[in-house]
Amino acid sequence: MTVHAPSNPHMTQNSATAGNMPSKIPTIRKVRQALGRVVRSPGDYGARVLLDGRYTSTSGKRYGKYSVFKFFPEEERAEIIDVEPK
């Protein structure tokens, strides 16, 4: 009997980004888990700050294959606000 692994939608991207998948998927999972720990209930509030340029919306141009922004779900990407130091 042959068992096939479920398809991974991230692996269908072009070969340049697919080659980086093994390291990026765990990275995104761990960052999302950490971000989720900031606010646990409706009465909680907090700030989530990622001090790394690879998480900005323009990181694809700046960091190329090292950018991780595009691997976040679309609704989470919409919450990210890019800021630049003065």
Image (tube, helix red, strand yellow):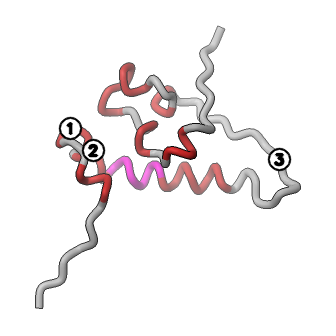
Q: Quadrant of residue 50?
A: top right
Amino acid type indicated by mark 3: Tyr
Amino acid type indicated by mark 2: Asn
Amino acid type indicated by mark 1: Ala
Q: Quadrant of residue 46?
A: top right
In this rendered view, identify the residue nearer to me: 46 or 70: 70
Q: Is residue 66 above or below residue 39?
A: above
At horizontal 30% and vertical 49% (from top left) the residue drawn is 21
Q: CA distance from mark 3 to mark 2?
A: 34 Å
Residue under circle 1? Answer: 16
Residue under circle 2? Answer: 20
Residue under circle 3? Answer: 45
Q: Residue furthest right?
A: 43
Which mark is in front, 3 or 2? 3
In this rendered view, identify the residue nearer to me: 34 or 69: 69
Q: Is the residue under label 2 in contact with that under label 3 (CB below 8 Å)? A: no
